[in-house]
Amino acid sequence: MTISLVLADDHPIVLDGLESLFGQEPDLKVLARCLNAEDTLRAVREHQPDVLILDLNMPRPGGLAVLRKVTKEHRSTRVVLLTDALDEEELIEAVRLGVSGVVLKEMAPRLFVECVRKVYAGERWVEKRSFGHALETLLRREAGLREITGALTSREIELVRQVAADRSNKEIAERLFISEGTVKTHLHNIYEKLRIKNRRDLTRYAQDKGLIPSSRRSRFSDLLPENDPPA
């Protein structure tokens, strides 16, 4: 059985290398090579390959946008993201979107071929050095979101995100098209429901439950006042 492939990378030299690598394998067949997102989506729609090898860092709209589009269209194509380095937030988003594989460009060629075969067989292949922590983060976020959804309304959850982004009551009111008084009322209700006392605690709660990346901790939570600012 032949595994059909579409290759997508904005560097022709990378495409040349991939095409040469897979061309040496009798069970792998490259149907198209693409330099941008538009050509990639067109090739996937036309050829419906078994596996799409997709550069994560393609020019706008980028690899994740292509992955999102392929997933939305419910294509049977499995996607392997190719990248120079792994960013945890991007990896979490890719996993959430149903990516089948994530590999570094430094990977040994024989392992890349093995990755494609395993992905085609229905297995998942993700760079192990980062995947373990990313998956743990993803699962924690999902559990935290379920807990929050059970305790707060969708409007209150949005308020939590806005506070955790270090926005003032006035900024929140402007963004959500409500009055500052309404913001204060929502915050009071949130504090009561979650049994917390101030904005700093609320930001830490949002981080713990995965509503915002933990990398924001040093930027926001340590700078927040203990109590809410005056109106």
Image (cartoon, helix red, strand yellow):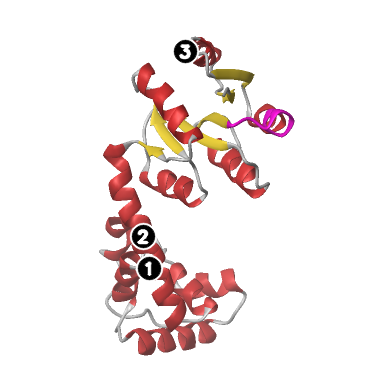
Distance from disc 1 to disc 3, alpha carbons, whole Å, reads: 41 Å
Secondary structure under tag 3 reads: helix
**On the image, numbered disc 2 is attached to which residue?**
139
Is 224 left or right of 189, judged from the image as shown? left
| Quadrant assignment, res 40 | top right
Label 2 CA crowd tier, 10 Å (few <14, some 14–19, many 20+): some
Quick check: 10 left or right of 103? right
Circles 2 and 1: CB atoms closer than 8 Å: yes
x 29%, y 75%: residue: 201
Contact flag, marks 3 and 2 (Cβ < 8 Å): no
- Quadrant placement of the C terminus: bottom left
Residue at point 48% right, 52% down? 96
Task: Look at the numbered disc 2 and give the secondary structure of its residue.
Answer: helix
Decide: is 151 above or below 112: below
Main secondary-structure element of the magenta-colored stretch:
helix
Q: In the structure shown, which secondary structural element does the residue marked by tag 1 occupy?
A: helix
Q: Which residue is mark 3?
A: 21
- At label 3, counting other C-alpha atoms closer than 10 Å, the crowd grade (few under 14, some 14-19, many 20 or more) is some
Choose top left, top right, bottom left or bottom right for residue 48: top right
Is residue 84 among the parts visible in the rendering? Answer: yes
Start-end of magenta stretch: 43-50
